[in-house]
Image (cartoon, coloured by chain):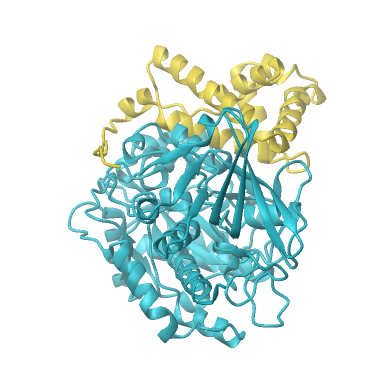
Amino acid sequence: MISFTRTTIVSLVEALLPDISLDPQYKQVVAADTAAFVTDSIGSMVFFLRIPVSILLLLFELSPLLLGRRRFSCLNASAQQHHCDRAGKWSLVKFNDLMKLVGSLSTLAWADHRLVRETIGFNWSPEVSQEC
Amino acid sequence: MHVIDGKDIHTDARIEADALVIGSGAGGATAAKLLAEAGLDVVVIEEGAHRRSEDFHGSIPHLMHELYRDGGLTPIYGKPNIAFAEGCCLGGSTTINGALCWRTPPHILRQWREQGLPAMGDDDLDHIFAAIENDLSISVQDTISGNSISRRLEAGSEELGWAWEPVPRAQRDCRNSNRCPTGCPTGAKQSMLVTYLPQAAQQGARLYTNARAHALQRDGDRVSHVIAKVGPAGERTLTIKARDVFMACGTVQTPWLLRRNKIGAHVGKTLGIHFNCKAVADFGEDISPAPGTMMTAQVKEFADQDFYLGGSNFDPTYLAVTLAQHGRDTVAAMVRHWNRCAVYLSQVKCSGLGRIVDSRMGRPLPLYTLTREDETAIRDSMLRLAELLFAAGASAIYLPLSGSGRLDSLAKAHALLDAGFDTARLDVLSVHAMSACRMGADGAAAACDGFGRLQGMRNVHLCDASILPGPTGVNPQVTIMALVYRNILHYLDNRG
């Protein structure tokens, strides 16, 4: 995947991740693992889906320039979150679909992360079969 | 069960069989088992990989990536886009579904009979349903332990005086692992992976995984050879010469493969789907949602309006993803209190028709646009779901509408839904697509004849959800299996 896309995804994931008062060290690990999962998922999409998503990510990265600000990944954390909130309502350029896609993927990886599960006290684990 | 991994095939290869089955899900496995039991030399090719029960205890996102087509990121395009999930692994969607096994509703079978379809009577199908129920150990499971989500649903239904039923599931000694959507880690789910496929293999069927059907070579009114891509990177070919070809690639892939190869008429023009609208209930107290299964009870009160209400598998991951559209703060707040929460859904039968077209970029393009009737049914189903959840004791709910936020009373849910909504805000998904190559009576403008044989082709038989004459309303696994069973028996009785 092209490097600008990766940078945008990392910033986007950090802006979209829920905050459950994780230990700061954990938070960094979770954010990095989540961004890696989202990057891999988008990178392994079929060409047919990956190209439009990559174009949307580029447009999204540049979209704050239209508002007289810096590129998305160069904004500070609160400005990034504010921009995500606003972009989630822009259906014309399909940023709402992009937010939905990245939001779902990052939430999926985040909530499944061992450190998040430990923090929220979820320790249910199913039995495992050695059959078949 | 011996399975040949297509990735281990390093040279182009050619094989022959009496019957080639493409796909190993509910339809393909049923066809393979019956054909092999009848003594035919059967080859099954499956695009996905072979994963075993012990592989199903890992991380949910990674298992989704391994077991679902495109990692579960296949959209049905329309307004709104609909997330569509189907299995792409040995056993197909039966490996990753909730194993809910309803017989085809009588009013649906009546409609199909009225369309002139043969052998759709009780006498024709009862013994088939019974055989499938026996083979898959379909039964209502004990709900004394676990399944608090479904028990809340039962309580809410009782409170409202609504009809509900225990859910028959293909399971043996379900341990309430709550991992149905990423494969059953205990082997309790009686998917094709642990039932019909091993039985077919025992009768001599040869199973190939990581073998993707790519081209159908036509010779007049027959398909003479099927070419599959195999090899470590799909760079090799496996050419299969078969007397008869049984296509069970699923409702999206079967019509696409046919269209790409310019075979068949009326193919891919009659897609039907079920919509799933997921909601989260916060019960304000610990309900121990973790041990359970997809659902053990379903509300049947609105069957005549073509929607059903039920629970859904619980894990903080599923909870968080369902809430993602409500923003990071909502996800954080609810995930911290996961033990108070549950995910429920309404399942709505579509009223319109979608299509499968060729994107010309190496992928099928499923299309469906919500009709007015769909919008009304979805709205009604969400209202009824809200009513049920508050009656069941929820202190607040979250509906699948972006920006709708936390609703802490039924009056607020009414106000939200009564005001109408832009469908672009609707977060809807589908796990049931069907009827894109439906069977029709003699002379009807349908892709298949009344027994699943592709019109205009002598040796191509469709064996998956695409042959259903229309959406079933209920989970279609048993209907798919029963119709394929019926069609294969007809084929065996009539083959030359």
Q: Quadrant of residue B63?
A: top left
Q: Is residue B268 visible?
A: no
What residue is drawn where x is 55% and y is 60%? B275
**Looking at the image, which residue is at 35% across and 52% down?**
B202
Q: Position of residue B418 (x, y in %)?
A: 58, 66
User: Hey, which quadrant is residue B268 in on the image?
Assistant: bottom right
Rendered residue at 76%/19% (across/down): A69
Horizontal side of residue B425 vs A92, given as left or right: left
The answer to which of B287 and B247 lies nearer the viewer is: B247
Considering depth in this image, is B42 or B395 the residue closer to the camera?
B42
Q: Is residue B407 left or right of residue B287?
A: right
- For the N terminus of chain B, the quadrant is top left
Tell me what hue chain B is rendered in.
cyan
Where B119 falls versus B174 (above or below)? below
- As drawn, the residue found furthest toward the left would be B144
Chain in yellow in the render? A
The front one of B312 and B390 is B312
Q: Position of residue B207 (x, y in %)?
A: 46, 46
Tell me the quarter of the image containing the C terminus of chain B.
bottom right
Q: Is residue B123 above or below residue B454?
A: below
